[in-house]
Amino acid sequence: MASKIKNIIIFTVVAVLLILIYIFFIKPAPEEQNLVSSSPVTVLPGSDTVNQNSLIARDFLSLLLSVKSIKLNDAIFSNGAFINLHDSSILLTSPQPGDEGRLNPFAPIGYDATVAPIPAPSPICTLPEVLDNVTKTCITPIVTCVLPEILDVITNTCITPPPTCTLPKVLNTTTNICVTPATCTLPKVLDSVTNTCVTPPPQTP
């Protein structure tokens, strides 16, 4: 009994499949009728161009008259539902800074790609200058001095510091050494460069 029911179900499914295949794939589609029908224009042998133009004009005129006879029902424009319609369009404006949205709307949430700024090219430094990685500028490196020399911050060079002189010696700024100042008697005066007594040149009246 169960095998008979099973066979009936199988045959029914196969029959339905065959009917569907015939309807959708084998049965030809019905030809659509033309919305506008016009009598064919017959060109008589031996007729001239004027007769042909008159036939075409007559067919075109009959087509215009058939279109003129079409009437549209404008009762929908006086319907309350149509009158109660309102414009719900949204005015699109330029986005404010920070409201542009995602760069890639198809990227997974949380994985938006950010465009890294292109770094400015580093300048090419000439010796003895070196590149400062913080300011990206060429600077002269600080000189390391060996004692007793010290660094002159103005010239960025190592110089020997002036000695500390004990009295009666004084510092000669030209030679950077301590010298004992000479005691001169008039009319001689002390020359600070040579630390000697010299006679001043005569003054002209």
Image (tube, grey):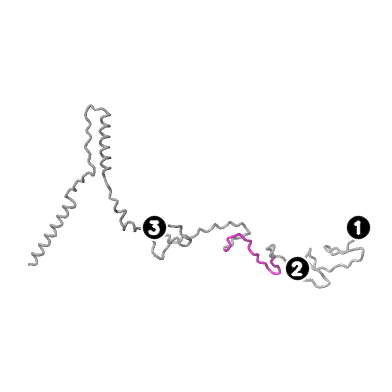
In the rendered image, residue 158, in percent from the top left (x then y), is placed at 69, 65
Label located before the other in sequence (3 or 1):
3
Look at the magenta stretch and give its main secondary structure. Answer: loop
Foreground of the two, 67 or 195:
67
Residue located beneath label 3 in the image: 89
Residue located beneath label 1 in the image: 203
Name the image quarter holding the C terminus.
bottom right
Residue located beneath label 2 in the image: 162
Q: CA distance from mark 3 to mark 1?
A: 103 Å
Q: Which class describes the residues within 10 Å of circle 3: few (<14), some (14-19), or many (20+)?
A: few
Q: Secondary structure at mark 3?
A: loop
* Amino acid type shown at disc 2: Pro
Quarter of the rendering containing residue 184: bottom right
The residue under the point 80% across, 73% down is 166
Name the image quarter holding the N terminus.
bottom left
Q: Would you say the residues marked 2 and 3 are in contact, meaning their CB atoms lie under 8 Å apart?
A: no
In the rendered image, residue 46, in percent from the top left (x then y), is placed at 23, 26
* Amino acid type shown at disc 3: Ser
* Amino acid type shown at disc 1: Gln
Mark toward the viewer: 1 or 2: 1
In the rendered image, residue 168, in percent from the top left (x then y), is placed at 84, 72
